[in-house]
Amino acid sequence: MAVIENSKVTVVGAGSVGSSTAYAALIRGSARHVALYDIATQKVEAEVLDLAHGTQFTGSSDIVGGSDLSVVEGSHVVVITAGAKQDPGQTRIELAGVNARIIKTMMPQLLEAAPDAIYVIVTNPCDVLTVLAQEDTGLPPERIFASGTVLDTSRLRWKLAQRAGVSTSSVHAYIVGEHGDTEFPLWSKATIGTVPILEWVTPQGDRMTVDELDQIAIDVRDAAYKVIQGKGATNYAIGLSSARIVEAILNDEHAVMPVSPVLHGFHGVDGVALSVPSIVSAAGAVPVAETQFDARELELFHASADALRQVAGSLRS
Ligand SMILES: NC(=O)c1ccc[n+]([C@@H]2O[C@H](COP(=O)([O-])OP(=O)(O)OC[C@H]3O[C@@H](n4cnc5c(N)ncnc54)[C@H](O)[C@@H]3O)[C@@H](O)[C@H]2O)c1
């Protein structure tokens, strides 16, 4: 596949996350056509109007939407944000039952409207929902994947950039595993420019320590809890992350991003969706098999896989 002309992305769910994704996609010009779909008619129509009212100030992207599934027709990418969100203090896994039922009902309808689209699942717990949806639909794993730790990786790079005194784009580091409590950074391969992270000298003249990096990893892992505590949802950063994934697909970028497709034979993990650096293009997401882990990271990776396998198993039965 090549770069898609007259590209269309549909965002399913017009809540905080879906509306912010549509807003980011419009401002960034992620797709020629942006559509928003939700079962809540008044809400989705109001969001579409509000977004449309700003299009004088965006690029050439347009916005349509509503509560009729025909909105989804012709989509090249469908981003799913519909479903229950975390209450303050609630984990993503605690949303699994209710959101699994929503996705199970919705996927056949979406596939009928957009049979050839690439599906990006943002609704939480996004990794577990991805494996269930992939199994139910029989879609090839590259065509249905979770936004995974693209957001967490951006949070990590922001914190490291601040400490290192460099721009975020000069930080090369990834969060992998579950988008949730068992995620972790691949510190063994993290660099600032080309300098290994522990060797970088900060503007204060010191170096980061292992303890400090451990604390940064915890802060990143728990970042959503803090935002949800303060404002009830996370929306801007996930909106931007989702729009960025959409661009990598529609522009056939072959960009390496830590999205979460169902893995097969990846460092001993099978049949679980987990975030690993993957090549994102018009064909979807393909894990980079050569990604290296040190012994401790591999242990954490398998622990993350075991945790999610258990949750998915409990929902299948
Ligand atoms: N993966 C990530 O990085 C990430 C980040 C933030 C939030 N999230 C998740 O995104 C989801 C949405 O969060 P939010 O804050 O936007 O929630 P929200 O409550 O603001 O919006 C959810 C929307 O989904 C709609 N909806 C429910 N069932 C539907 C259906 N069957 N079809 C169409 N629409 C339906 C609702 O009407 C509502 O407008 C949550 O599961 C949240 O945990 C994921």
Image: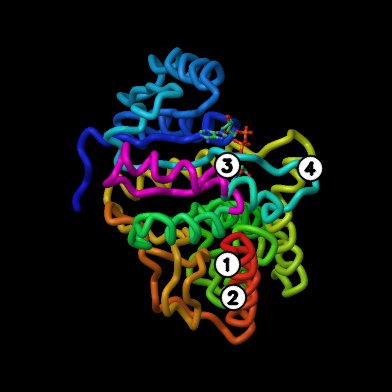
Q: Is residue 35 left or right of residue 115?
A: right
Q: Amino acid at mark 3?
A: Ala
What is the x, y in percent for residue 79? Answer: 44, 42
Q: Amino acid at mark 4?
A: Pro
**Of callouts 4 and 1, the N-terminal one:** 4
Question: According to the image, label 3 marks what residue?
Answer: 237
Residue 88 disc label? 4
What is the x, y in percent for residue 238? Answer: 56, 43
Q: Residue furthest front?
A: 317
Q: Which residue is found at the position 53% from the left and 72% from the top?
A: 195
What is the x, y in percent for residue 220? Answer: 68, 56
Label 2, label 4: how far apart the Cα atoms are: 27 Å
Q: Which residue is found at the position 63% from the left and 60% from the top?
A: 164
Label 4, label 1: how far apart the Cα atoms are: 23 Å
Is residue 149 among the parts visible in the rendering? no
Label 3, label 4: how far apart the Cα atoms are: 18 Å
Q: How many marks?
A: 4
Q: Nearer the viewer, residue 256 or 44?
A: 44
Magenta span contains residue 263: no
The quadrant where ligand 1 appears is top right
Label 2, label 3: how far apart the Cα atoms are: 25 Å
Q: Which residue is found at the position 73% from the left and 41% from the top?
A: 228
Q: Residue furthest bottom?
A: 295
Q: Is residue 108 left or right of residue 227?
A: left
Is residue 170 among the parts visible in the rendering? yes
Question: According to the image, label 1 marks what residue?
Answer: 177
Question: According to the image, label 2 marks what residue?
Answer: 301
